[in-house]
DNA sequence: CTCGCGACTGACACGACCGTCAGTCGCACG
DNA sequence: CGTGCGACTGACGGTCGTGTCAGTCGCGAG
């Protein structure tokens, strides 16, 4: 299927574009996309090289022309995706010139949500299969993850210093926040919500980290535990 | 599977303790524990039956006397653990006779944390390997997970009705909450925090879902966005 | 003592998947 | 033309883990 047969137009001299049927980059991309789709459907471990090449419509040997092995494609997929996520995040500037912090926070949430919704397959793969493959790979992933945690922790610490972030261990808060976000992303992608629910979800996530949701019961006097606001 | 071979009560005399070396139940337990430890160390997919039997100190064939296959042990481990978690959760009673809701919430958080800290290996396994094995297994796990989500969603909805839970889609709030908790459990177990940090962590999680952490900047007039409390 | 039985063993046959490599194909260049 | 080259192919040998099953062992009953 999808056999890229036949000759295309060959540009006389251009060596770069001489091979028309598909350039190396295009073939690579083709395999990458096939792999992504199969991974998303069957999961990493259920997937064999044969599955991938069948989906891509190339021969087994061709796969090995472009990638080391199954781990190789997988790693590249995760790399690309995680860098798209990284790209979507912008560091919070405390002394806001024009942009109030809440808006920056909301923008970040919205951006991440958007990337995930545009790359549902990858989002699912990242949360379902990316962990527990190989200790080397795990470590690499943990590094990326730690960077995000680190970044958020720093921001929280700074926020605490100027009083716009409540008390608590920043690192713990970072875990809680990221965990909440991860879970929501996964569910949204899995349940197949439409991409335009991003705005409403952004608001809801923002409200959550902003105010939580548990309220003191109205009739009970609120003196019992003195922890509150600040 | 689950060969409920005769034996059982039938013994005229004292058959139960006749086989001294190990009873059937004990051997089963022995294999389960070996499997748990190996899974936690190498991950489910890296683990072979040989690894498990080596750790348990029995022969390959013996394993198959007690379990269907690797999936079988794994499923049983997850079953036991998830039911311990379920057991730890108690439904929130709104019209508190004596126990205020916040206390019930805290108790639940604390109980779950305690189970996880007492079963680090299982906690790690659950979050690292339990997903993406097999579509049948995935569905079973999703069912358990959905029950928890369902329970929490209901409680949140009830809470909203009497004004102790803020606005928002209960299901989304449930995902955010559970995600936050999951992530923290995983990190706590992985990083190897001591079990006596449970109290402090409980408080921090409670504060998070209770108040969030983002505060309006002090100097800025708080009227800019009218969403607030409610 | 010997028989029977249940628990246990581990060598073996099997199948799945992997990575390779000798060979095909089409094209541009001399 | 024919030659060289780069892209591609797919059959093949090799590895690894699985599940089985014929056989051993210990012990209590007859």
Image (cartoon, coloured by chain):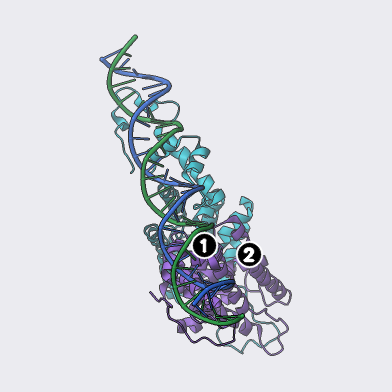
Chain colours: A purple, B cyan, C green, D blue
Q: Residue at x 53, y 46 (%)?
A: B38
Numbered disc in front, either 1 or 2? 1
Between A205 and B35, the one lying in front of the other is: B35
Name the spot of residue B119 as percent of width and height, x first: 53, 49
Q: Is residue A55 left or right of residue B204?
A: left
Q: Is residue B125 visible?
A: yes
Name the spot of residue A218 as percent of width and height, x first: 51, 74
Between A142 and D21, the one lying in front of the other is: D21
Q: Quadrant of residue A150?
A: bottom right
Number of callouts in the render?
A: 2
Share a chain, discs 1 and 2? yes
Q: Residues within 10 Å of mark 2 (few under 14, many from 20)?
A: many
Q: CA distance from mark 1 to mark 2?
A: 35 Å
Residue B2 vs B191, above or below: the answer is above
Q: Quadrant of residue A165?
A: bottom right
- What is the chain identity of the residue bearing mark 1? A
Q: Which residue is mark 1?
A: A70
Q: Residue at x 55, y 77 (%)?
A: A25
- What is the chain identity of the residue bearing mark 2? A
Q: Under tag 2, what secondary structure?
A: helix
Q: Earlier in the sequence, mark 1 or mark 2?
A: 1
Between B130 and A51, the one lying in front of the other is: A51
Q: Is residue B155 visible?
A: no
Name the spot of residue A141 as percent of width and height, x first: 60, 64
Q: Is residue A165 left or right of residue B140?
A: right
Q: Residue at x 53, y 52 (%)?
A: B43
Between A9 and A3, the one lying in front of the other is: A9
Question: Which quadrant of the figure contains the N terminus of chain A?
Answer: bottom left
Q: Which residue is mark 2?
A: A172
| Label drawn at residue B70 | none
Name the spot of residue B187 as percent of width and height, x first: 60, 59
Question: Which quadrant of the figure contains the C terminus of chain A?
Answer: bottom right
């Amino acid at each position: 299927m999808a056999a890229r047969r036949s000759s295309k137009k060959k540009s006389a001299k251009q060596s770069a574009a001489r091979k028309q049927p598909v350039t190396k980059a295009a073939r690579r991309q083709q395999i990458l996309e096939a792999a992504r789709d199969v991974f998303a459907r069957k999961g990493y471990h259920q997937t064999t090289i044969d599955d991938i090449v069948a989906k891509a419509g190339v021969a087994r040997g061709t796969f090995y022309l472009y990638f080391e092995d199954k781990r190789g494609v997988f790693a590249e997929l995760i790399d690309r995706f995680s860098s798209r996520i990284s790209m979507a995040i912008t560091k919070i500037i405390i002394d806001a010139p024009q942009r109030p912090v809440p808006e920056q926070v909301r923008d970040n949430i919205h951006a991440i949500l958007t990337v995930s919704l545009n790359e549902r397959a990858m989002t699912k793969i990242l949360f379902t299969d990316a962990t527990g493959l190989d200790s080397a790979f795990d470590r690499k992933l943990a590094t990326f993850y730690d960077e995000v945690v680190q970044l958020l922790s720093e921001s929280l610490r700074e926020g605490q210093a100027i009083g716009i972030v409540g008390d608590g261990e920043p690192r713990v808060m970072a875990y809680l926040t990221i965990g909440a976000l991860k879970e929501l992303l996964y569910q949204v992608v899995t349940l197949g919500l439409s991409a335009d629910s991003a705005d409403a979800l952004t608001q809801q996530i923002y409200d959550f980290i902003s105010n939580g949701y548990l309220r003191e019961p109205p009739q009970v006097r609120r003196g019992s535990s003195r922890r509150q606001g600040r």
